[in-house]
Image (cartoon, grey):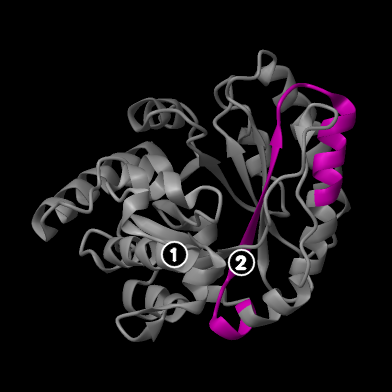
Amino acid sequence: MNEQQAEQMRHGAGFIAALDQSGGSTPKALAAYGVGPERYASEAEMFDLVHAMRTRVITSPSFTSKRIIGAILFERTMDGSVQGRPTAEYLWEIKRVVPFLKVDKGLAEEDRHVRIMNPIPGLDELLERAVRAGIFGTKMRSVILAADPEGVGAIVDQQFEIAERISATGLVPIIEPEVDIHAADKAEAEELLIAALTEHLDALPEGVDVMLKVSIPTVDGRYSELMKHPRVMRIVALSGGYERSEANARLARNPGLIASFSRALLEGLSDSQSQEEFDSVLAATAESVYEASVA
């Protein structure tokens, strides 16, 4: 573990940029950016376009550690380069932004009101590559659709099982058990989730730290106690489908919880904007998300 990066993740003021859209979410991300399917004829061309979008974001003068302390990358982005340097190296050496890697392969079909992660073939090899590339940590996402104790337990069991494999390589796992913001019993699901997370965190050996990525809670401050757990490096929040203004307002009511936004971070950016317009919009977005994160 890079101790300078670990210190930034534990105590740095700012938020994490989630730039990890993968196969299923990339067309939506490109469409929101003003790049329609008529612009690409293959998956390779599609990923080239999204890499160009991410490169534009990462190289913007508005994208610095003054506001952004970490960034989550998709595997192809890690394997790519920015201004002639490997992406993770560019992020840390040039921008002082800590690089993370999305490692999950999407979600299984709903069962017991949750969607656990699909199997992750080749995980060990991917983790080895991530370590060589200078990645600090990983991220993997599951989804809770309702307050089902068995389902929530299955999600957390799977997350920690894989997290232990990740920790063994020296990488810091971000465990992301998203609670659907449309769940009718979202607050109850969050209570179940916190109980399951606490049980697993208590069982982690000293020296093994994880991060958590959660939905902004229904009850303000609900994750405050979990932030104090000695095995929790940081707790970050996804926007979860809220528009950025609402996500920021909800986040600001939860001191200590910082943003890790994806769609909400890119909201308002367009392929057709001049560089000056693009940088101005990104700067305003970064400032608003930063302010909500340090409130």
Tell me residue 18's x, y (percent): 47, 53
Residue 46 falls left or right of residue 32: right
- Disc 2 versus disc 1: nearer the observer: 1
* Relative depth, front residue between 76 and 129: 76
Q: Residues within 10 Å of mark 2 (few under 14, many from 20)?
A: many
Q: Residue at x 63, y 43 (%)?
A: 227
For the residue marked with disc 2, what is the amino acid? Gly
Q: Residue furthest top?
A: 184
Magenta-tinted stretch: 130-158
Q: Count every numbered label the image shows and give the total.
A: 2
Between residues 224 and 150, which one lies in front from this camera angle? 150
Q: Is residue 11 left or right of residue 283?
A: right
Residue visible at 33% across and 28% down? 245
Considering only vertical position in the picture, is 237 above or below 80? Answer: above
Residue 76 against residue 115 in the figure, above or below:
below
Left or right of residue 100: residue 104: right
Which type of secondary structure does the marked residue at label 2 adopt?
strand
Q: Quadrant of the C terminus?
A: top left
Residue ID at (48%, 36%)? 239
Looking at the rendered structure, the kind of residue marked 1 is Phe
Instruction: Please provide percent x and percent y for residue 185.
Output: 70, 15
Quadrant in which residue 126 is drawn: bottom right
Identify whether 127 is placed above or below 37: below
Q: Residues within 10 Å of mark 1 (few under 14, many from 20)?
A: many
Which residue, given by chain and number where applicable, does mark 1 sit on?
A: 47
The residue wearing badge 2 is: 137
User: What's the CA distance linking mark 2 and mark 1?
Assistant: 23 Å
